[in-house]
Image: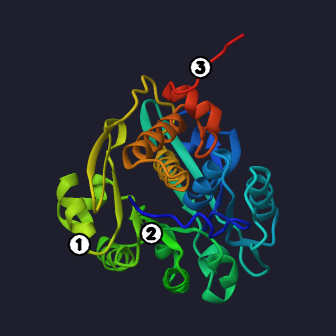
Amino acid sequence: MIEVDMERGKDNMEVITFGESMVLFNPDSTGPLRYVHNFNKTIAGAESNVAIALARLKHRVGWFSRLGDDEFGRYIEAVIRGEGVDVSRIVTDPSNSTGLLFKERFAHVNPKVYYYRKNSAASNITFKDLDLEYIKSAKILHVTGITLALSQSAREAVYEAVKMAKANGVLISFDPNIRLKLWSAEEAKVAILEMIKLSDIVFPGVDEGRLLLGTEDPKEMIKQLLNMGCSTVAVKLGKEGCYIANRQEEKMVRGYVVERPIDTVGAGDGYAAGFLSGLLNQLSLEECGKLANAVGAMATLVRGDMEGFPTLSQVREFMGTDEYIDR
C-alpha cells in the first residue's frame, strides 16, 4: 500500500488541488436549450468537486484557481469556501471572465454539455500563480488532465507544480479526465502519458485506457501504468466498481447498485475523493476501493455535479457500517 506521510500537512492542508471551476446552469426541464427558459445556478469543476467531497469527509483541503473579477467568480469562491475548503490562494483576474457551462438534458441520457470557457480567467493560469510553499506543505497534490487541456500556460503550471511537489515528498494524485472538446486525442495522449510518469496515484477509466494505452482490460492497464512508475492505480469501472492495484496486490472491488441514478456527472470525482480519503485514513487497498465506490455511487443520487457528495456519516450509513436511525 502506498505510504502517506501522516506528519506532513499535519498543521496545513492534507490535499491541495487546482484547476478551473465554472458556473453551471442546469436546466429545470428536458429538451433542447432553445425551449428551456429556467435554470438552476451552481458550480462545476473536477478539481473543486474533489476538494468539496474531501472536505465533507472531514479532510483539510485547499483549492485555488484564477477567477474573473466578476460576480460569477465571487459566487464560485463563496460556494467553495462555504463547503469548508481553503480558498486563500485564489488569484483574481481583472482582464478575463469566469467560465460558464450549460447542460442540456434528455430523459435517461447523460446531459450534453456546452462550455463557454475560451480565454477564461482559469485558462490563463501560469506557474507564477502558484504558491509553492503552500503546495509543498501538503500530503497530496491532486491534478487532472482538464487543466492540462486548458492552455499551454496552464499545462506548464501543472507540470512545474507536480515536479516541485514530488521533489519535496508530496504524493501526486492524477485523474486523466480526458475532455475531447478541449483538445485532440493525439495531444491529450502525449501530455497525459507524460503526467502519468510523474504521478504516484492514477485514476483512469476504461475509455481512457483505450485511448492512452490501447487496451480496455483493467489488468493490462494496471500492468502498464505500474511499469510507468505509478505506485497505485485505481481503474474506474462505473457501476461495476473498480479494479485497483499497487505493487503488492490487486483487487476487484464491486460497486454499489443505484437503481435510479439521477446525474452521473461528478461520480468519478467523488470516487477519487473517496479513494484519497481512504489513503489518508490508512485504510487497506480494498477498503479504499469500497469507500471510493460508495462516494461515487452517492454522487449519482442527486442532480448536480457536487451536490450529492456525502458526509462521512452519510457514506457510512450507505455502506452499512453505521446504523441509520430514521426517527
Count up the numbered dots. Answer: 3
For label 2, the residue is: 145
Q: Which numbered dot is residue 323? A: 3
Q: Are marks 3 and 1 in contact (CB under 8 Å)?
A: no
Residue at image position (65%, 48%) is 25
- Between residue 7 and residue 16, name the one nearer to us: 7
- The Cα–Cα distance between marks 3 and 1, rounded to whole angstroms, is 42 Å
Colour approach in the figure: rainbow
- Between residue 23 and residue 133, name the one nearer to us: 133
Name which residue type carries label 1.
Asn
Percent position of residue 238, x then y: 35, 42
- The Cα–Cα distance between marks 3 and 2, rounded to whole angstroms, is 38 Å
Asked whether the viewer can see residue 178, the reply is no
Q: Secondary structure at mark 2?
A: helix
Closest to the camera, between mark 1 and mark 2, is: 1
Q: Secondary structure at mark 3?
A: loop
Q: Which numbered dot is residue 311? A: none
Percent position of residue 39, x then y: 68, 41
Percent position of residue 159, x then y: 48, 83
Q: Quadrant of the C terminus?
A: top right
Q: Which numbered dot is residue 227? A: 1
- Between residue 191 and residue 142, name the one nearer to us: 142
Vertical order, 218 against 257 (above or below)? below
- The Cα–Cα distance between marks 1 and 2, rounded to whole angstroms, is 20 Å
Q: Quadrant of the N terminus?
A: bottom left
